[in-house]
Image (cartoon, grey):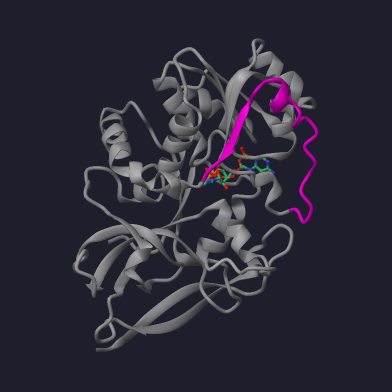
Amino acid sequence: MAQVRNKQVILSNYVSGFPKESDMEIVETTITLKLPQYSNEVLLKNLYLSCDPYMRNLMDKPEGAPNPLSYTPGSPLGGYGVSKVLESGHPDYKKGDLVWGFTKWEEYSLAPSAQIHFKIEHFDVPLTYYTGILGRAGITAYGGFFEMGSPKKGENVFVSAASGAVGQLVGQFAKLTGCYVVGSAGTKDKVDLLKSKFGFDGGFNYKEEPDLDAALKRHFPEGIDIYFENVGGKTLDAVLLNMKLRGRIAVCGMISQYNLSQHEDVSNLAQIIYKRIRMEGFNATDFYPLYPKFLEFVLPHIREGKIVYVEDIAEGLGNGPAALVGLFSGRNVGKQVLVVARE
Ligand code: NAP
């Protein structure tokens, strides 16, 4: 069996502070497209990769107990993606299956079968959706909003990073539930998108608000029932002052803190006591058991055009470093996808 080229995006050095394109490098290696004998692994052709903020955390030099997913300089990045099975040593998968799960930033990967999360079974929607709305971002928004947020019709919902992969879905789920929903985002165009495309009731550009507390009071004169937290820092501090009694904060992410060696102080935490706020963090994987139920809910809405999804597509592994770094300056509009190959 001949060897073929296997282009990869590797980590050049551990990262501190904001990641740069030069922290990564494109290299060409080779791979034999044949499973080793008696292997129960799966040989994958990677098609679409998901660019995710958590990937920055895996670029840190490990301290203390190592995270098994952490990147090593000289090795390819790992991340979620949509792949085609070329050969399988595991009975659950066969040649030609399309799957989504944890793979590597390279053209072909030899992956343990446990890293495949789901076999793709619905093909009447774009395959790229399995990096976003039908992948990790989707189950995150669904579990985070419905399970952590326990929303009720008529409640007030605030979402930060609202035009992004997760945020745009939370806003739409909130509208479908009959909530009043406002989002924050980092440009005027993104704020316009919240209202014109995703049906939010309002939005503001957090970079142009000198006083976030005042901005929230303007949009939520009666306070916030549910805050879907994506950014942390100053936004969280201002939100805490505006929560209603027995409000819920679903802590999905804190992207404003990922590149800081020392996290910003949040000074209004005592509001959690005074307002009896329930604030809870979660990981997308917590909600994987709900994935079939989630698909039953979301697929009809996509097909009927009642839920839309905006993607930002970068072409080719060579554009991977820029696409990933761009998440931290807000360059992406919607879900950042990286195309490795189209089927
Ligand atoms: P995304 O929103 O599509 O992209 C990241 C966005 O964050 C950027 O476009 C930018 O938008 C915003 N941002 C960047 N730096 C910021 C800063 N300093 N302050 C405020 N906003 C900033 O990404 P995503 O995949 O949907 O992720 C959103 C959040 O959810 C992240 O915190 C991520 O870590 C988290 N997450 C958690 C889980 C989980 O399992 N718990 C799963 C998925 C995602 P603007 O232009 O609006 O600033």
User: Where is 125 relative to 120, above or below?
Assistant: above
Q: Is residue 280 located in the magenta-colored stretch of the structure?
A: yes
Choose top left, top right, bottom left or bottom right for residue 280: top right
Query: Looking at the picture, how far across and down is residue 281, in whole percent?
Result: 57, 41
**What residue sits 62% from the left and 59% below the top?**
57
Q: Is residue 247 left or right of residue 147?
A: right
User: Where is 234 relative to 77, above or below?
Assistant: above
**What residue sits 65% from the left and 23% below the top?**
276
Choose top left, top right, bottom left or bottom right for residue 213: top right
From the image, which quarter does the C terminus lie in?
Answer: bottom left
Q: Is residue 123 left or right of residue 188?
A: left
**What residue sits 75% from the left and 19% below the top?**
214
Region rendered in magenta = 260-282
Q: Quadrant of ligand 1?
A: top right
Choose top left, top right, bottom left or bottom right for residue 222: top right
**What residue sits 68% from the left and 69% below the top?**
61
